[in-house]
Image (tube, helix red, strand yellow):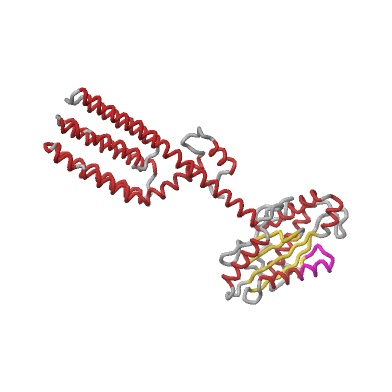
């Protein structure tokens, strides 16, 4: 499961909480930020270039309204702020740390406001008063256009508001103009702050709902491909896996092994101990198969040694399946018949090691299992034929007395066997 996973209950609780903060648990927050980084990196060229173009076009207002400081404004626009905006664009493309990108975007906003206020402060008159309205648009753009989170945006807006009020009340503008400009700026501050909060809130809610849908899809897929009792793969997943293996290796001659497993005298076990106990027994047997496939430790203190190689064929690894009732199947691509027989023998002994009592068994005083093994190349056998041959071998193991592997595994001393599993 990926590191960003969250349970369905956690996601539902977050969605149902209308007072949730704009911060998620660490794993979800990391997933959201990764999604943002991907989106902002793709859109940064349009965001920054469009913003830079609009900002630079405001040089026209400098030329017409305040020509005495137009050159200074051009230098600040074209040689200070615009290069910073281009730098942010390339930084997004390089996927630098997000906090650094966010700080740079906030710094650009401050520089845009500073440029506007410096030009205003150096001038006076009606034209300067009209020019100051550009500062309001900077606040609006900063809150609703730049890729900055609400908390950083709110702090930056407070700073912009403070800078604005300082410049206005230290200027030579008439008091009514100062009051009016301040009211405009405070209205823009309040309105865009609320809008920014709502945008981020709904962005997070949409993210939560999308993640919930992903979890529900994963759960549905898992339910469709796994046995509900044992957690092993089911026959549907077996069909998909074998189709992939046969499609990818039909002409290669690489071997594929199938092991059929049947719990001995299981009806008698259910009759004596009851179906709940029978379910627990099947779970423990399935645990042996799953542990062998993982290469991990076995329940009940299994035999020493590692697990299986991780699948010898492209596109398909080892798979343990509950085939039906008390029957299981092991799909072992890349293993020859002798190797698969040794795997089956190891599983057989580890089932015995579980020492699950079975007093009515006709074989032993504990639960045992019988195994039928077949291996062959995909070019020589169909998937159905290979399973049928393994099933026939299983019936041979039952005919010979159960609790054994058919065909019998070769001993380690056999000269032709190269042991890869022990």
* Quadrant (top left/top right/bottom left/bottom right) for the C terminus: bottom right
The residue sitting at the left extreme is 68
Q: Position of residue 409 (x, y in %)?
A: 74, 68
At a point 66% along the width and 56% down the height, the residue shown is 226
Is 104 magenta? The answer is no
> Is 410 on the left-hand or right-hand side of 124?
right
Looking at the picture, tell me which residue is in the foreground, 1 or 240: 240
At a point 28% along the width and 27% down the height, the residue shown is 183
Would you identify the image quadrant in which residue 351 lies?
bottom right
At a point 83% along the width and 57% down the height, the residue shown is 267
Looking at the picture, tell me which residue is in the foreground, 154 or 201: 201
At a point 62% along the width and 64% down the height, the residue shown is 240
Q: Position of residue 265 (x, y in %)?
A: 83, 59
Q: Which residues are magenta?
A: 392-404
Is 398 magenta? The answer is yes
Would you identify the image quadrant in which residue 419 lies?
bottom right
Q: Position of residue 399 (x, y in %)?
A: 84, 68
């Amino acid at each position: 499961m990926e590191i960003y996973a969250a349970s369905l209950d956690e996601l539902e609780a977050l969605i149902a909480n209308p007072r949730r903060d704009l911060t998620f648990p660490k794993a979800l927050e990391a997933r959201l930020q990764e999604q943002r980084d991907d989106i902002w990196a793709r859109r940064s060229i349009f965001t920054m270039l469009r913003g830079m173009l609009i900002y630079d076009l405001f040089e026209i207002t400098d030329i017409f309204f305040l020509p005495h400081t137009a050159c200074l404004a051009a230098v600040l626009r074209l040689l200070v702020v615009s290069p910073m905006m281009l730098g942010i664009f390339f930084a997004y493309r390089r996927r630098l740390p997000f906090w650094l990108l966010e700080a740079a975007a906030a710094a650009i906003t401050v520089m845009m406001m500073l440029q506007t206020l410096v030009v205003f402060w150096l001038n006076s008159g009606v034209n300067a008063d009209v020019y100051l309205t550009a500062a309001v648009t900077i606040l609006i753009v900063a809150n609703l256009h730049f890729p900055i989170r609400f908390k950083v945006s709110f702090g930056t807006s407070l700073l912009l508001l403070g800078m604005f009020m300082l410049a206005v009340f230290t200027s030579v503008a008439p008091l009514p103009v100062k009051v009016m400009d301040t009211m405009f700026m405070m209205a823009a501050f309040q309105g865009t702050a609320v809008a920014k909060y709502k945008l981020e809130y709904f962005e997070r809610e949409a993210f939560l709902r999308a993640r919930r849908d992903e979890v529900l899809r994963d759960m549905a897929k898992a339910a469709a491909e796994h046995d509900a009792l044992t957690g092993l793969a089911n026959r549907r997943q077996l069909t998909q896996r074998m189709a992939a293996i046969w499609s990818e290796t039909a002409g290669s001659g690489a071997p594929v092994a199938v092991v059929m497993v049947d719990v001995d005298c299981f009806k008698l076990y259910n009759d004596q101990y009851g179906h709940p106990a029978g379910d627990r027994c099947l779970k423990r047997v399935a645990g042996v198969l799953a542990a062998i496939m993982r290469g991990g430790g076995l329940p009940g203190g299994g035999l020493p040694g590692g697990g299986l190689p991780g699948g010898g064929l492209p596109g398909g690894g080892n798979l343990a399946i509950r085939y039906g009732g008390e029957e299981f199947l092991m799909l072992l691509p890349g293993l020859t018949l002798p190797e698969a027989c040794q795997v089956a023998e190891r599983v057989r002994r580890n089932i015995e090691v579980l020492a699950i009592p079975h007093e009515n068994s006709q074989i032993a005083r504990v639960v045992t299992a019988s195994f039928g093994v077949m291996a062959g190349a995909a070019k020589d056998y169909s998937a159905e034929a290979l399973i049928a041959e393994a099933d026939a071998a299983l019936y041979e193991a039952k005919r010979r007395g159960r609790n054994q592997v058919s065909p019998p595994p070769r001993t380690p001393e056999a000269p032709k066997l190269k042991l890869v599993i022990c």
